[in-house]
Image (tube, rainbow, N blue to C red):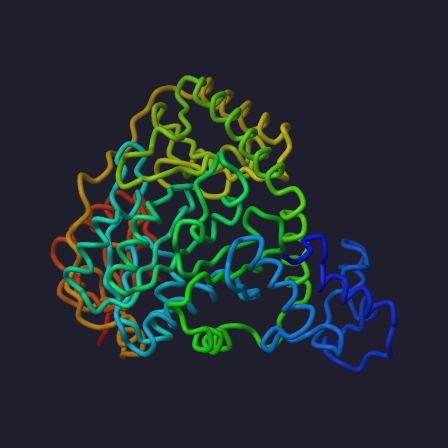
Amino acid sequence: MNDQNRTPLFDAIVEYNKRKPSYFRVPGHRYEKGISPILREAVGDAIFSFDLTETPLLDDLHHASGAIMEAEQLAAELWGADYTHFLVNGSTSGNEVMIITATHGGGKVAIPRNAHKSALMGLILGGGNPVYIMPELEREWGLHGGITPEAVEKMFQENPDCKGVMVVSPTYYGIASDIRGIADVCHNHGAILMVDEAHGAHCYFSDLLPKGALELGADVCVQSIHKVTGSLTQSSMLHVKSDRIKKSRLESNLTLVQSTSPSYLLMTSLDVARHDIARRGKEMIDRAAALAIDARDRINAIPGMTCAGKELIGRAGIFDYDITKLVVSADDIGITGFDLKKMLFFDYNVDMELADYRNALAIVTFANEQEDLDRLVEALQDIAEKNQDGTLLPLAKKLPSQPEYVLSPREAYFSDRERIPWMDAKGRIAAEMIAPYPPGIPVIYPGERMSEEVWDFVEAFRQRNGHLHGPSDGKLSTFVVVR
């Protein structure tokens, strides 16, 4: 067993800087000397001595054999992986690598309709052919729910040649699917299970949260360590725990999507974040959970405000729930999630992570203080007292049927395209995605033919100024299609 008290990459940089060499490598700022005085005054000088490159002491991310390799091995041990790779292009690059590796030049891969757009990027880059799985819809909150083992089994019955399944768990909103059940189904069919665990790196360190994907049978997962476990933005990890994945193929695919000039600031932040979690992870994550539990109880005591919790389990394919996510709704007093988020920021100096039509989301981490949660709760109390009853637009009764699959996302992306009036889009092959909010599930992907049912569904959103993700024309007066 390795010594989790070590920080090999951090230590290597400190040792290098003690040498104070005459520096003739990139980056060109030569520590703080070439940095703008404005930036130096704002952040100080020390950080710039960690912005280095592949020197003789500092290893090479693309051919790790020293300090980076040791840091990755420590991370693999902590999260229970066979091996781990640091990612400096965020979890986006990890999701792309998983998809490219699974499809390997055009095979089928199953992805949920609510997958992060990086899954679509992976399909475009790798030429994979998607089989879409629709998550269930939780109607009370307007959230997309989980993916069930039964839905995955049905997919394999219809697509026995599918090479892998991707699941997002936990989602941005904290919703976890039955990963163990899905893993069993995948492995029974000789396929791999890939988990976009960008929002779940902390789940391995507290009994109050869903179990981590690697603990439940996932073959490979991607985690955004920066989201809730303390590293810098854009730094993530890819973990593999499987003999079903060809290591050389995966590592070759990593070179396609990772920068050849990886930031040592990002990699060092991964090393020291892992060190911190290894030493006191349970204490840190339990503290975040306790803060969130207390805030949730107080929010639910405010007339007109509600905060989702474990009562969601058992609905809409939801197997478990991450309680450090505070999904807050002012639905009962007629305030949309979008407006609630704006009020909280501009009137109360409380900045929420995101909003949809029904809800605003707060992510609670170990670094939050009690005063942060107090300010949120007090702001919601004040908003509730100042606003009278209202009525929100109802949720759609159901999502439209999945439209006809005509071209792979890669074929659609590289086809000649044209922008046409939205009113003429029926029957045309989409070259961009449309995801109405709520529930944020794309009703059409690139390469699918615009059905009358989908067009009518989207048009109803457009007519009432609903929120649409995906189209390059935000007002959807025009739409991009394959020529």
Looking at the picture, how far across and down is residue 227, in whole percent? 54, 50
For the point 63% across and 69% down, which residue is it? 69
Compared across the picture, whether 350 is left or right of 412 comes to right
For the point 75% across and 81% down, the residue is 25
* Residue drawn at 27 percent across, 79 percent down: 416
Q: Up-down: is 105 above or below 342?
A: below
Do we see residue 479 in this rendering? no
Left or right: residue 263 versus residue 472 is right
Seen from this angle, which residue lies furthest bottom? Answer: 24
In this rendering, position of residue 179 left or right of residue 157: right
Report if residue 183 is visible in the image.
Answer: yes
Q: Look at the image and tell me in which quarter the C terminus lies.
A: bottom left
**Is 311 in front, or is 162?**
162
Q: Could you tell me which quadrant the N terminus lies in?
A: bottom right
Which corner quadrant of the image does residue 143 belong to?
Answer: top left
Q: Position of residue 256 (x, y in %)?
A: 47, 77
Report x, y in % for residue 152.
23, 54
Of residues 65 and 35, the one nearer the viewer is 65
